[in-house]
Image (tube, helix red, strand yellow):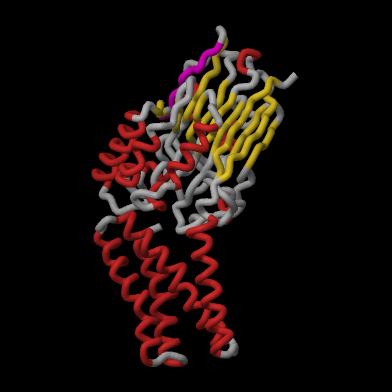
């Protein structure tokens, strides 16, 4: 989302309702309080334009828009449609409270989801393999020191997984979002390792950088992940081994059927290169639309792990209407012997989550007889 979109929200949700309410209902101290959130939002809009503490400025701006500004638009619409002053005011307050609850209470209501998945072709030695599937931290949405991230790590570690697989979107807009959380994230550990891919946000395409700055900061983000012992699979693969058997873990750069997201060099063939025939393969691919496009019925991949959707069936990104639907948006999907698991994720690039509680996913693989 670009600056002009934020400016449109500011005018539509803030300035226009303030003008109308001032004319129709306002006066005195109430009028001054009415305009105060809009004036504060204007300051943060300027900061966003100038790239000043970009992530934090955008977070505060989004909170103001949903908790203060959008409710004034609702108040205005109710009044224009003939509702009385009291009803219109009550509607606006109700909407503001709703968004406050969504942002501060519902969004961090973490749960642990445990699933057993029957898999064809799984080596007998890996029957019972416990995978911790994490996705979509979006750290910038939680500010510079939110204890929520510690809760995620504690929940993951309490499950004692054999391997941790992360399917992207660690940050929203820049690598600095991860700085305050490095000590907590560094506590993630598993006997067979931590493997990760990049999500669309990890390419830092949605922020304020010049191209040179963006490339430099994406490299910094990769270095930060590697410093925690994460193996970042950039169109590459690795192995985990147990009792003489092995499983390949492959990771692909982000591939999406949504034209809103530009190509970033995703290459499934390269990601699977060198994996011997018959070796069971787990693929990490951030966007689940990739599964139907290139994996299901087409590639020798037994299990694919994705995120990206946040559990939403619909997502408005771009103007290509067929791209608005996630046919695989949460949970387990099968196509013959191939299985896809889509995590609902842990955070949101938005001010709040729209599709239910965030989840740490624990997948126990079972050899299908």
> Residue 132: which quarter of the image?
top right
Q: Nearer the viewer, residue 200 or 142?
A: 142
What type of secondary structure mainly makes up the magenta span? strand
Q: Is residue 321 above or below residue 227?
A: below
In the displayed structure image, the side of residue 36 where residue 243 appears, left or right:
right
Residue 238 shown in magenta: yes
Quadrant location of residue 266? top left
In the displayed structure, would residue 331 be above or below residue 140? above
Q: Is residue 57 left or right of residue 249?
A: left
Which quarter of the rendering shows the N terminus?
bottom left
Q: Residue at x 37, y 81 (%)?
A: 33
In the rendered picture of this protein, how many numbered marks are placed on residues? Answer: 0
**Residue 222 at x, y = what percent?**
34, 34
Front-most of 340 and 336?
A: 340
Residue in the image at 58% along x and 40% along y:
112
Say which residue appears at 56% left-offset and 83% top-offset.
78
Magenta part of the chain: 234-242
The percent position of residue 314, horizontal first and vertical second, equals: 59, 54
Residue located farthest toward the right when viewing the structure as drawn: 369
Of the 4 image quadrants, the one containing the C terminus is: top right
**Is residue 233 part of the magenta span, yes or no?**
no
Is residue 319 visible from the viewing direction of this image? no
Q: Is residue 147 left or right of residue 214?
A: right
Residue 28: tell me if it is visible: yes
Residue 333 at what x, y percent from top left? 67, 37
- x%, y% of residue 341? 61, 36
Q: Is residue 144 left or right of residue 323?
A: left
């Amino acid at each position: 989302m670009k600056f002009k979109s934020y400016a449109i929200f500011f005018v539509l949700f803030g300035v226009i309702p303030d003008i109308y309410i001032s004319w129709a209902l306002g006066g005195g101290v109430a009028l001054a309080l009415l305009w105060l959130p809009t004036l504060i939002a204007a300051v943060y809009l300027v900061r966003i334009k100038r790239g000043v503490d970009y992530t934090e400025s955008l977070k505060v701006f989004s909170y103001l828009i949903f908790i203060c500004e959008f409710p004034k638009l609702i108040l205005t619409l109710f009044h224009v449609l003939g509702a009385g002053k009291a009803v219109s005011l009550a509607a606006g307050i109700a909407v503001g409270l709703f968004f406050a609850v969504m942002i501060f209470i519902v969004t961090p209501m973490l749960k642990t989801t445990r699933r057993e998945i029957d898999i064809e072709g799984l080596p007998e030695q890996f029957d019972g393999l416990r995978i911790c599937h994490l996705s979509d931290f979006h750290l910038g949405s939680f500010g510079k020191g939110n204890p929520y991230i510690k809760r995620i790590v504690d929940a993951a570690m309490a499950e004692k997984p054999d391997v941790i697989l992360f399917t992207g979107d660690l940050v929203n807009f820049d690598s600095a979002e991860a700085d305050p959380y490095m000590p907590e994230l560094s506590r993630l550990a598993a006997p067979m390792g931590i493997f990760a891919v990049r999500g669309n946000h990890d390419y830092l395409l949605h922020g304020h950088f010049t191209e040179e700055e963006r490339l430099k900061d994406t490299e910094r983000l990769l270095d930060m992940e590697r410093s925690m012992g994460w193996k970042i699979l950039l169109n590459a693969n690795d192995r985990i081994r147990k009792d003489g058997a092995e499983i390949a873990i492959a990771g692909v750069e982000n591939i999406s059927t949504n034209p809103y997201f530009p190509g970033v060099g995703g290459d499934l063939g390269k990601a699977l290169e060198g994996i011997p025939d018959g070796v069971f393969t787990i693929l990490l691919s951030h966007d689940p639309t990739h599964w139907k496009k290139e994996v299901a019925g087409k590639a020798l991949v037994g299990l694919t792990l994705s995120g990206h959707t946040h559990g939403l069936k619909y997502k408005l990104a771009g103007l290509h209407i067929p791209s608005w639907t996630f046919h695989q948006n949460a949970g387990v999907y099968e196509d013959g012997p191939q299985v896809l698991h889509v995590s609902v994720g842990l955070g949101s690039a938005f001010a709040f989550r729209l599709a239910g509680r965030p989840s740490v996913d624990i997948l126990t693989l079972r050899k299908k007889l």
